[in-house]
Amino acid sequence: MGLPLPEDPGQHADELSRGQKKCVALLRALYGSPALVVVDEPEAYLDGETRQRAIELILSGRDDSMTVVFSHDPEILTACDTVYDLARPHTWNDD
């Protein structure tokens, strides 16, 4: 279960929706199993089902890499091993 891609692989980026651009960017960031993945608001511009699939995809490779997620979404934050609150830098949740 992957993320939806544009139907035409030759489609210019200017012709993609924000959600399609987000999917392409996430897939490019995760391609090749990098040791470090940094994503900012990965759920932005995605509909419900695509949003859930993106979260699962991002968090699925955590055993082999470090993933840094910047988000306000409680669902993503509760799935993370460690959460740092940048508004209160001396507090964090480290399970």
Image: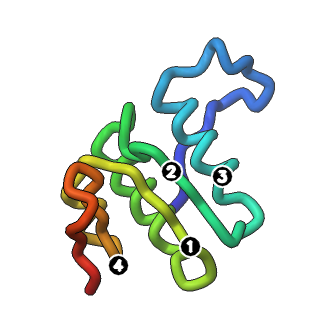
Circles 3 and 2: CB atoms closer than 8 Å = yes
Indicate the secondary structure of the residue bearing disc 4.
Answer: loop
Task: Name the quadrant of the C terminus.
Answer: bottom left
Q: Residue furthest front?
A: 90
Which one is earlier in the sequence, the residue at label 3 or at label 2?
3
Which one is earlier in the sequence, the residue at label 3 or at label 1?
3
The colour scheme of the drawn protein is: rainbow
Residue 73's place in the image compared with 67, above or below, is above
On the image, numbered disc 4 is attached to which residue? 81
Label 2 to label 4: alpha-carbon separation? 15 Å
Q: Tell me residue 80's x, y (percent).
A: 34, 72
**Viewed as shown, does residue 38 lie left or right of 76?**
right
Circles 3 and 1: CB atoms closer than 8 Å = no
Q: Tell me residue 86's x, y (percent).
A: 29, 53
Which one is earlier in the sequence, the residue at label 1 or at label 2?
2
User: Which residue is drawn at the image coordinates 69% and 72% (left, top)?
Assistant: 35
Amino acid type shown at disc 1: Met
Which one is earlier in the sequence, the residue at label 2 or at label 4?
2
On the image, numbered disc 1 is attached to which residue? 66
On the image, numbered disc 2 is attached to which residue? 39
On the image, numbered disc 3 is attached to which residue? 29
Indicate the secondary structure of the residue bearing disc 3.
Answer: helix
